[in-house]
Image: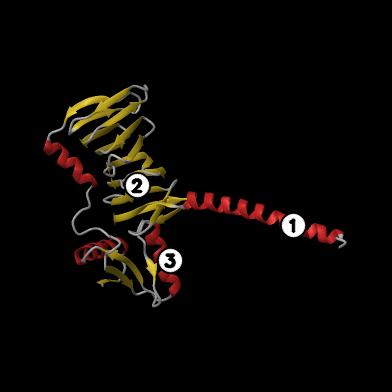
Amino acid sequence: MKVTQQGRAWRAKMRKIPYMLGIWMLVGNIVAALAAPVGMVDAVQFPAWLDRAGLSVPISPDIELQAGDAVRTGAGARLIVKLGEGGLVKLGENTHVVIDRVQSRGSASESVLSVVSGVFRLTTGAQSRSSSRDMTINIARNAAISARDADLWGRSREDGDMVCLIEGQIEIIGNDRKILKLDQPLQSFQSTRTAPPEPRGLLTRQEFDVLAAETEMEFGKGATPKGNWKVVIAGFATRAEAREAARNLRTNGYPAEVTADNTLTVARMDGELAARQLAARLKAGSGFPQVRIAQ
């Protein structure tokens, strides 16, 4: 049978289809891996923000985090993030952290976080004999902490950095490339932005308790994925007014949403007390005429 030139061209295109499908599947897998969640916000005490791809949005307690995301907390805020590999990160007020990388390969996982400023507590996931979980915390480009099966608390400020080991062991690589090891509970180090880390000695339990409170959620002030209370803000004459108020709240770190009846809600507050305290704060700070709580 005679094959026309058009037929040969059609057959050539058909032979390319499996090749093109393979390329698109590979691209799709790469994109999915880059966008895969590496953690989730477990609790938040507002205000707090997520920075992603040049945009900032207020953090809500169920939001999934990706590699490359930055999270920030404002005055009086707290944030708890569960990493996909099992680690737990707690942030205090006025803290800025970047999730550089969280990778898992079989039974091994590796996480890299950068603390730009603020206070944090990090607990790596418990490891077994058949698994390993490595975590690196970069502190203000001044020191890098390598942790495996450890619990630690840290602070990064312009006047200096400090880290306290709670349990386990960690290694700190300073800006002089020397390694400092901590392997005793409540052992700590400190450094300025220009000097390498230096041992600080052991903290007392009372000293540590004061520091630890800076990264713990305050009673009756948080929002969680299972929270079933909300703050309701009403009294807007038009939907445009409600949207403008929602934009202002979101810019200030509160995940307000506009509902069908031109009211705003900040949902998932963890109990009646948390909802009441947030309602009082929003009413005092913004002058909203009608603020109430509901389930």
Q: Quadrant of the N terminus?
A: bottom right
Residue 251: image location, x then y, percent: 40, 57
The Cα–Cα distance between marks 2 and 3, rounded to whole angstroms, is 39 Å
Is 204 positioned to the left or the right of 144 in the image? left
The Cα–Cα distance between marks 2 and 1, rounded to whole angstroms, is 44 Å
Q: Which mark is residue 13?
A: 1
Q: Nearer the viewer, mark 1 or mark 3?
A: 1
- The residue depicted at 21 percent of the width and 26 percent of the height is 200
Relative to residue 45, is residue 212 depicted above or below?
A: above
Residue 25 seen in the figure: yes
Question: Foreground residue, 164 or 246?
Answer: 164
Q: Which residue occupies the extreme front position in the image? A: 1
Neighbours of disc 2 within 10 Å: few (<14), some (14-19), many (20+): many
Q: Quadrant of residue 181?
A: top left
Q: Which mark is residue 24?
A: none
Q: Secondary structure at mark 1?
A: helix
Q: Which residue is mark 2?
A: 85
- The residue depicted at 65 percent of the width and 55 percent of the height is 18
Q: How is the image coloured?
A: secondary structure
Q: Secondary structure at mark 3?
A: helix
* Label located before the other in sequence (1 or 3): 1
Q: Quadrant of residue 15?
A: bottom right
Q: In the image, what residue type sits under mark 2?
A: Glu
Is 208 positioned to the left or the right of 27 in the image? left
Q: Which residue is mark 3?
A: 244
Q: In the image, what residue type sits under mark 1?
A: Lys
Count of labels shown? 3
